[in-house]
Amino acid sequence: MRTKTLKKNKVNVVTLGCAKNLFDSEVMMAQLKGNGYEVDHESEQEDASIVIINTCGFIENAKQESIDTILQFAEAKKDGRVDRLMVTGCLSERYKPELQKEIPEVDAYFGTRELPRLLKTLKADYKKELVGERLLTTPAHYAYFKISEGCNRPCAFCAIPLMRGKHVSTPIEQLVENAKSLAAKGTRELILIAQDLTFYGLDLYRKRNLAELLDRLCDVEGIDWIRLHYAYPSGFPMDVLDVMKRQPKVCNYLDMPLQHISDSMLKAMRRGITAKKTNDLVDAIRQKIPDIALRTTLISGFPGETEADHEAMLRWVESYRFDRLGIFPYSHEENTSAFAMEDDVPEFVKQERAEAVMEIQSGISWDQNQRKVGETLQVLVDKVDGDRFVGRTEFDSPEVDNEVLLPSGTYARIGDFIPVKITSAEHYDLFGTPVA
């Protein structure tokens, strides 16, 4: 039963999944606001008459979270707490017919490239003059910055090309204008995202052009940090490291998902790289940028993974000592090439193997953080948590990496850079005192 009056022209946007989805929600929200709608992101007010859920469909856990969220708001609609419910994003792109049949309470389903149609359903226009405009859901001083859409890579486990299509780069000129717009509103850090950053430019400029893009973005006044996420190892453009070394605005940080180190697994995953080439690349990156923070992601329990493959991964993680590392148990996704393989590693074994990797990584993180004690690092203040200000170094991305906790009573402003002397450290947190 409806307990409060819903605002007819108010939309609550709910985002699930990765930063690329968050970026898409921010673009959608700017378009809605430009059409006169009041827009909130994941509002707790429960007074919006319209809810739009931007879903994730990448792996089983993410799909289930998206379905559970849709069902939650479908119940709210039945109870009169929502008038209209719409679903967009990756899950909707991938499973629209099934969703329409199973959850008919949803008024309309849209794919990943159907923003104009979604707006039209709400009697709104897609405003070309708002291209590049977003309503940030992050704090104003940092923003995720998508430089391309889709992916051309043939990875056996990945459903992204099914949901996002082929790789399409955004032109440099447009990205520079977008960066200037963000800087004018107080953004100081750009976190570059794409399904594959290193493929950038091949479709537009007939060459990998990430290095030139970085140089151009460094010229934008007001932007102080530029961070690189989701670089593919095969065909990695080494000139990006030259820019990183030359341009102080480009953080000494690289997120490069490597997925595995066993040659048999890399071949089965269709990664286009060998263990030796992987190690040679990591060695070359570290030689060029000695203090770089390398983040990677791995997969445990891919079809055919043996105990020997797993042991090889453990030895490699222990030996190569990545600064940041995450690992996901393999998810058997239909319509991927790996779906034709037998999903022969039991779920509990996938989980055990993932936990074994993370146990090693926990020790590495502890050691790496202890080495920072006594150093003075530049910290970007992100937020207030209780009575503490919390920030990050250039070696840390928001949400997924280390945080720097400042003592209670510290005076700071969110969005400021301040020098901080690290006084102690835990596995995933640093503690420090601002230096006058």
Image: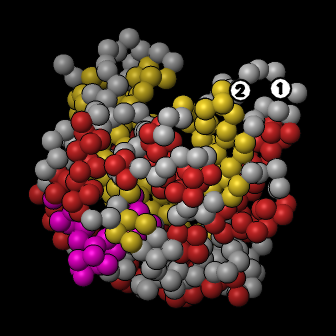
**Residue at image point 44% right, 54% down:** 324
Residue 159 image point, x, y percent: 60, 73
**Residue at image point 48% right, 56% down:** 20
Residue 106 image point, x, y percent: 76, 51
**Residue at image point 54% right, 35% down:** 37
Instruction: Tell me the SS state at disc 2.
Output: loop
User: Mark 1 packing: few (<14 Cα in 10 Å), some, or many (20+)?
Assistant: few
- Distance of label 2 from label 1 (alpha carbons): 9 Å
Task: Name the residue beneath numbered marker 2.
Answer: 6
Instruction: Using the image, determine if residue 180 lies above or below residue 150.
Output: above
Instruction: Tell me the SS state at disc 1.
Output: loop
Q: Name the image colouring.
A: secondary structure
The stretch of residues the image draws in magenta is 193-215
Front-lying residue, 374 or 384? 384
At label 1, which amino acid type do we have?
Arg
Q: Are marks 2 and 1 in contact (CB under 8 Å)?
A: yes
Task: Name the residue beneath numbered marker 1.
Answer: 2
